[in-house]
Image (cartoon, helix red, strand yellow):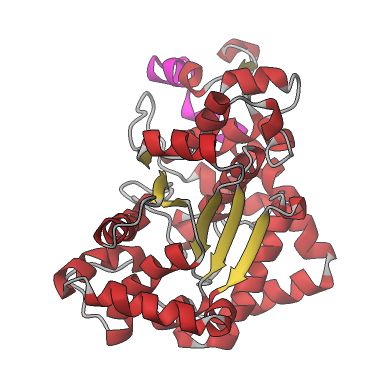
Amino acid sequence: MDQAVLRKMKDKTACEWLGGSIWGMMNLEERFNVIRSIGEECIQEDELRNLLANKPQPICYDGFEPSGRMHIAQGVMKTINVNKLVASGCKVKIWIADWFAQLNNKMGGDLKKIHVVGQYLIEIWKAAGMKVESGNVEFVWSSEEINSRAHEYWPLVMDIARRNTLPRILRCGQIMGRSEQDELTAAQIFYPCMQCADIFFLKADICQLGMDQRKVNVLAREYAEDIKRKNKPIILSHHMLPGLQEGQEKMSKTDASSSIFMEDDEAEVNQKIKKAFCPPKVVEKNPCLEYLNYIIFPWFNEFTVERSQENGGNKTFISFEELVADYECGGLHPADLKPALSKALNKILQPVRDHFKNDANAKDLLKRVKSYKVTR
């Protein structure tokens, strides 16, 4: 987070101001820094600066397959990132990829179930604090938008398919959670061509997706170069949160022990964090520290550990770097870090729990989604 911007906001935490109409308070470099902070990788930084200098409201594309319950990587991280983009003057189009979920056999390919899951996910983001009421966040259902402008969409898909070899398309299988060695259906081979087309169909300036979607975004830049398009889509790839157990590089919806879901109750969160992999003095590939870096500090701007005087007393960390230094030397122990992490996560998730408890429509959506079998 750009510290100059935070100083302008005085005592407000990131979760309070992100998503507000504050980009007019920022200069170009501050806007760039806030947007750039979202990405583990940016292709290319000079293009991003040029875009911000020349387009008053860039269009950012994000998307998701409605494929099951939402974990905190998709729920909280996306809320933080979308709100940063809106706060920096961007228009965010969130592509609800219902047809893509069907192509990828999610929810057994049942489009009605996929639509229910999509509605449930939108309810979560609203409850979590995504600034949809700003008017600068738009949810776009792929089936509706493609059907309404089929004459634009399908020629684009066909042109992308025509210009690329089968091996090049197969290398994009990672975007569906597949590998080049997997046996794919014809629909799944067509999927990358369609996702590449989405970027141009939505007139996106910035592709704001996870690192696991990088290959198809690069395909879009290659296509733009092939057709001699002046402005290539800028790729802003965010970090992928790991699962809670040792060696889990990515959260899994099919393995409840690897993920914290957005409607998990307090006891479930406490239990999952208690069992999480968190070796003393080890920072690398430590999921608890990753949650602090990518969720807790961006949300609260600080992290407080409560402990007895014998163990050093309470301490508030104002940066992740400060916490890492304390953890690596053994000054902060997992036995103290974990309860504090659970408390912070539960504070973030409580409004979501309240919404799904008190809103009849949201409660019904959750009940139906929990009854569905998640299919790969």
The N terminus, quarter of image? top right
The answer to whether residue 106 shows anywhere in this view is: no
Residue 3 as seen in the image, left or right of residue 233 = right
Tell whether 162 sits left or right of 50: left
229 versus 327 height, above or below? below
Residue at image coords 68%, 71%: 366
In percent of width and height, residue 369 lies at 61, 76
Of 359 and 333, the residue lying toward us: 359
Range drawn in magenta: 324-340
Tell me which secondary structure the magenta stretch mostly adopts: helix
Residue positioned 29% across, 72% down in the render: 160
Percent across and percent down for residue 356 are 76, 64
Residue at 57% over, 25% down: 30
Q: Position of residue 4 (x, y in %)?
A: 61, 18
Residue 189 makes an appearance in the image: yes
Q: Quadrant of the C terminus?
A: bottom left
Residue 21 versus residue 317 in the image, above or below? below
Instruction: Indicate yes or no whether the magenta region holds residue 42.
Output: no
Total marks in image: 0
Camera-nearest residue between 321 and 154: 154
Q: Nearer the viewer, residue 25 or 190?
A: 25
Quarter where residue 228 is shown: bottom left
